Image (cartoon, grey):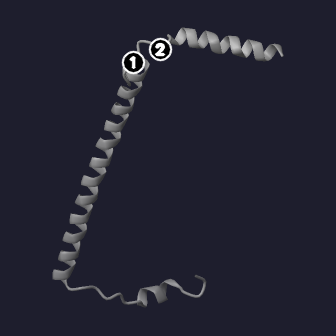
């Protein structure tokens, strides 16, 4: 701010709590920081776990083991060929 010089700022008095209270404040802050750190560790571990689960789900899906298989279903190759044939017919119109 233009109207406030360093001399004016040096004159400002900031009240500080007693030493005992400062110690309690520091202890509270440190306790909160340790709780935050523990929470961050849990979040990080869960993120890694979710990535492993995602990979496992994708692997099972591609292996056809995600849901029970119906033996009467046609193989994917037959369905893909039918889709290709349908598209070819539509393009011919």
- Height in image: 35 above or below 89? below
Closest to the observer, 39 or 17: 39
- Height in image: 77 above or below 10? above
- Height in image: 2 above or below 41? below
The answer to whether the residues at label 2 and label 1 have Cβ atoms under 8 Å apart is yes
Q: Which residue is disc 1 drawn over?
A: 69
Corner quadrant of residue 17 = bottom left
Is 86 positioned to the left or the right of 73 in the image? right
Q: Which residue is disc 2 drawn over?
A: 73
Closest to the observer, 28 or 79: 79
Q: From this viewpoint, which residue is outermost toward the left?
A: 20
Q: Residue at x 22, y 65 (%)?
A: 30
- Height in image: 23 above or below 73? below
Q: Residue at x 42, y 90 (%)?
A: 11
Q: Element at badge 1?
A: loop
Picture coordinates of residue 41, whole percent (x, y): 27, 48
Is 44 positioned to the left or the right of 62 in the image? left
Q: Residue at x 38, y 24 (%)?
A: 67
Picture coordinates of residue 40, whole percent (x, y): 30, 51
Q: Tally the marks.
A: 2
Picture coordinates of residue 35, whole percent (x, y): 24, 59
């Amino acid at each position: 701010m233009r109207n406030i010089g360093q001399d004016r700022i040096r004159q400002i008095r900031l009240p500080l709590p007693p030493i005992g209270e400062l110690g309690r404040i520091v202890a509270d802050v440190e306790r909160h920081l340790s709780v935050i750190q523990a929470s961050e560790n849990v979040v990080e571990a869960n993120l890694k776990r979710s990535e492993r689960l995602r990979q496992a789900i994708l692997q099972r899906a591609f292996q056809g083991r995600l849901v029970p298989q119906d033996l009467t279903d046609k193989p994917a190759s037959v369905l893909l060929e039918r889709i290709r044939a349908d598209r070819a017919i539509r393009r011919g119109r």
